[in-house]
Amino acid sequence: MTPLLRQLQIWGAQWHRDDYLKVLNDKIAYWARKPYPMRALHQEIDALFVDDPHLLETLDQFLVEKFPKQIAKAEEARIEQEETHRIACEIQSESRLLTLPREIRDKIWEEAVIGQVIHISHTEAHSPKRRRPGRPKRAKFLYHACKAGLHSSACPPGQGDHINCSTDGPSDFHGISLVCRQVYLELPASDSMLSNNALQFSDLNTADRFLFGLDEDIRASVTHLKLAVPYSLTGRIYPLYGVAMADPWQSICNYYSNPWDRKSLRMYPKPNDQSHLLREPIHFYYSGCYYAHNRDRLYRTWQVGRGNTSWDVTISELKYRGCPRLEVAMACPTAKEIANEASHHSSAGLWRTEFETHPQSWLIPLLQFRNYDQLGFQFYDKDGVKDFQPDFVAALKEHIAGLPIGPQICAFFAGGGYANGQAYQL
């Protein structure tokens, strides 16, 4: 038995010795297959030795005797790494950009990575580094920079003004972070990337998986969404009151049409909450029992409802957060879809411009946005945005924006999920 192993067995007897030796052996075996600088190996096993320099010295002796070729390769790797670092430092020191004051560089980074459009796509490939035995696969998303600019349409990549945008290949947005470590550390945090850029999705399923896979604070911080939706959405049936399991269109509208901070609504997600709770519509109502038995609470305490339950909220405690800017691009109907539409109902019925009493079913989730003037709605085909049903688009925007002057509809103050909020005004 080597002196190293004898000492490690004595020291490792304080805990599970076999497990300790297995971890150490695995690290050394990996290093022996692909030698890298000894300093990096020391850092990896430093925790095992609890900063004991004597053990590290003994380890070095053991490796020199056992793996002389690997030690030589590791030394070559160290020299190459230091030379690369030296050249990089010289380049950085000569960079006119990196010699600017930090405040100016921060402004430049903001211009480079904030206020852009990010095309987010999903791939079935999963990173092997993230896989652990017994853990479910995590969806992998790719981020590509939009070449059409912030004021472009919500068309999917490869169509219309996004003809030069692509979601193929590895992520290229935020590629500036790979320039050097200094740039990486100075760039805004990844949370800022999502909250200060427009997120474009070419299909609702990808948007649903991405948005509801984020942490709550990051999901709530999103400020701009661009959604490309299929024409088949117009054929979906949604109930006026209540909902079973929300689909992606419902889920996104339900969540982002709520302008109130979820903590002030007492519905901030908890670790053990069921995932569907985030996707359900929210509504307010004033209980008649308060007037009969609690006159002092009149107009001060309401009920906020979600699903089949509700609870008290004090109006003065609500915090207004606002809704993100939403742009929707719907694919123009094909000849087959137009023929199918004609055989079931008239085009005038599908695109009627009155939404108060019997709105089109697929519009019900979208109509939860109240006093909202940031809606963008357009139709597109492979050539770009088309002037299709302009009267419907204008009427929809006007209805959701509400009155410019006069009583404002209090968002979500309605008698149930997807109910008509026009009956409740301030």
Image: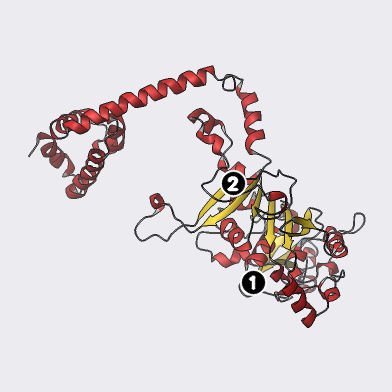
In the visual, does 18 lie left or right of 157? left
Give the residue type that dot 2 points to. His
Q: Earlier in the sequence, mark 1 or mark 2?
A: 2
Measuring from the top left, give residue 225's x and y in whole percent: 68, 53
Q: Which residue is mark 1?
A: 307
Q: Which residue is mark 2?
A: 144
- Compare residues 387 and 220 and report the one nearer the observer: 387
Secondary structure of residue under mark 1: loop
Give the residue type that dot 1 points to. Gly
Q: What mark, if any, has residue 331 been given in the picture?
A: none
Q: Is residue 30 above or below residue 203?
A: above
Residue 292 appears in which quarter of the rendering? Answer: bottom right
Residue at 46% from the left image edge and 56% from the top image edge: 125
Q: List the single residue furthest toward the bottom.
A: 343
Residue 67 appears in which quarter of the rendering? Answer: top left
Few, some or many residues within 10 Å of mark 2 (<14, 14–19, 20+): many
Q: Which colour scheme appears in the figure? A: secondary structure
- Compare residues 65 and 145 and report the one nearer the observer: 145
Q: Considering the image in quadrants, where does the C terminus appear?
A: bottom right
Measuring from the top left, give residue 374's x and y in whole percent: 78, 53
Measuring from the top left, give residue 402's x and y in whole percent: 86, 59
Secondary structure of residue under mark 2: strand
Residue 88 appears in which quarter of the rendering? Answer: top left
Q: Is residue 38 above or below residue 391?
A: above
Q: Considering the image in quadrants, where does the N terminus appear?
A: top left
- Asked if labels 2 and 1 touch by Cβ distance under 8 angstroms, the answer is no
Few, some or many residues within 10 Å of mark 1 (<14, 14–19, 20+): some
In the visual, does 290 lie left or right of 185? right
Q: Is residue 351 above or below residue 20?
A: below
Q: Is residue 57 above or below residue 211?
A: above
